[in-house]
Amino acid sequence: MFRLFKEDIEAVFEQDPAARSYWEVILTYAGLHAIWSHRIAHGFYKRKFFFIARVISQISRFFTGIEIHPGARIGRRFFIDHGMGVVIGETCEIGDNVTVYQGVTLGGTGKEKGKRHPTIKDNALIATGAKVLGSITIGEYSKIGAGSVVLKDVPDNSTVVGIPGRVVIQDGVKILKDLNHSDLPDPVSDRCHMMEEEIERLKKELNALRKKGEQNQNVHSNL
């Protein structure tokens, strides 16, 4: 347990350039507090002390603004940056070296039983406000762009953006954990531009047909 706690602190220094000292990280990082509280709650949960586990998770939620169900399984060096509004469901499984930003939801899509929350594989990154819903898998080294809503499996080494989420980069280049949230491809915008071009083309064809009809009408009138 203490080894895991030490690794969690090291993950903060690796991922957050604003971290200056161990005491600052230990005392002021809500994401770290939420992870440590979860590790304790999960220990009670595995031993079927469900009520105590839930109490610990809700106290942690009150103080940190981060809700992690005690049943969720979280790997090593998990990093929650800022963290406010993060929600992680009961059957969620998170691998090692995963990074999550504020406002992320790893949730379900209904009242189904069994595995109903996402599986996040090693080294994945989920950006601000993204929603990953249902019993789906996010592949290793994959990135979910800010504000995306992901409802389907994501392959390894992929970048997903949009609503619903679409894979826009896969196995193209080496994937780094420095996702630029302000410079992502936008497939929704691209599709809107295509539709605008198609509408403009149809307007021109319609105008041409109208002119041709008017000319034919004038010819018949003259006859």
Image (cartoon, rainbow, N blue to C red):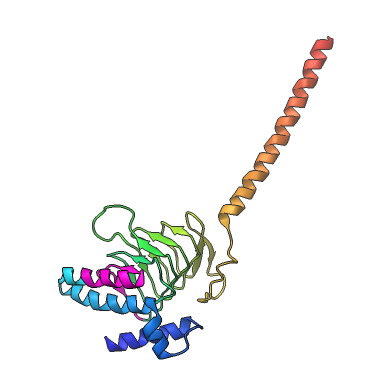
The answer to which image quadrant residue 217 occupies is top right
Measuring from the top left, give residue 156's x and y in whole percent.
45, 69
- Nearer-the-camera pick, 191 or 111: 111
Q: Which residues are magenta?
A: 54-76
Residue at screen point 26% across, 85% down: 1
Measuring from the top left, give residue 6's x and y in whole percent.
34, 88
Is residue 95 shown in magenta?
Answer: no
Residue 172 as seen in the image, left or right of residue 206: left
Residue 48 as seen in the image, left or right of residue 142: left
- Whether residue 75 is visible, yes or no, is no
Measuring from the top left, give residue 125's x and y in whole percent.
45, 71
Which quadrant of the figure contains the C terminus? Answer: top right
Residue at the right extreme?
222
Is residue 67 shown in magenta?
Answer: yes
Q: Is residue 138 above or below residue 31?
A: above
Residue at the left extreme?
48
